[in-house]
Amino acid sequence: MARKSKIKSQIEALRAELWPNIEKMHVWNRQTSDGYSTMPRTISQLGAIGDALSGKGKPVMQTYLELWCRVYDDGFVNLSRQQEIAFASGFSGQRAVATWRERMKRLHELGFIDIKEGPSGPYSYALIINPYWVVASHKKNGTKNFPQDRYVALFERALEIGATDLTEYNKELAEAVQ
């Protein structure tokens, strides 16, 4: 039995033991329900690192997470519904869109996204950059407020889930130095 199938079977058995009366329709299954997005399993750790890099009083995680919830597997996000995106990012009131744009600008400055102008103004489209590579770049460059402890936790979790982006970045960096 393949490793994934075995793990899936073990999880299903444990879930059935812990919640014997739960009906399948009460558990969201991305293979039978619409509305799922693919994102890194380490998104919360990546967001916490982004918040640390952004500085006090300027958290970017909610905005970043909302972008991930709107992206397909190509990294491209259409930002034409800015009021709605700002609200979903946690901003409301008169300054909702302005505050959201500040967070978008900060995500862009930190390298987590690229932004292009278009029919909705300066923030019409976004491209989500591989967050592992962004974080590794900040580590390499010694960016102010870089949370080394969170990076180590991210690195360990990435190894645990089989995400090789950080090790590949470090390998390419080592080869470039030689």
Image (cartoon, rainbow, N blue to C red):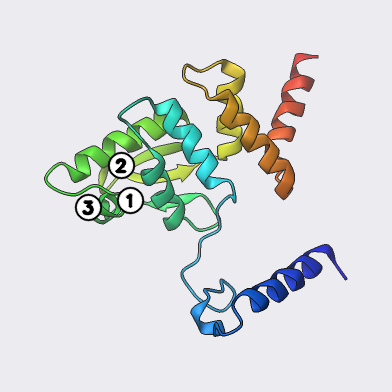
Instruction: Find disc 3 in the rendering and name its residue.
Output: 83
What residue sits 72% from the left and 27% below the top?
A: 170
Task: Name the side, left or right, on which 79 lies relative to 26.
Answer: left
The quadrant in which the N terminus is found is: bottom right
Residue at image x 60%, y 33%?
A: 133
SS category of the residue bearing label 1:
loop
Is 95 situated above or below 56? Answer: below
Relative image position of residue 109 (x, y in whole percent):
41, 27
Position of residue 132 relative to residue 12, above or below, is: above
Q: Is residue 121 visible?
A: yes
Q: Nearer the viewer, mark 3 or mark 1?
A: 3
Q: Are marks 2 and 1 in contact (CB under 8 Å)?
A: yes
Q: Earlier in the sequence, mark 2 or mark 1?
A: 1
Q: Which mark is residue 79?
A: 1
Q: Earlier in the sequence, mark 2 or mark 3?
A: 3
Q: Distance from label 2 to label 3 (Cα)?
A: 12 Å
Q: Find residue 39 and report its horizontal and vertical position in percent.
A: 55, 53
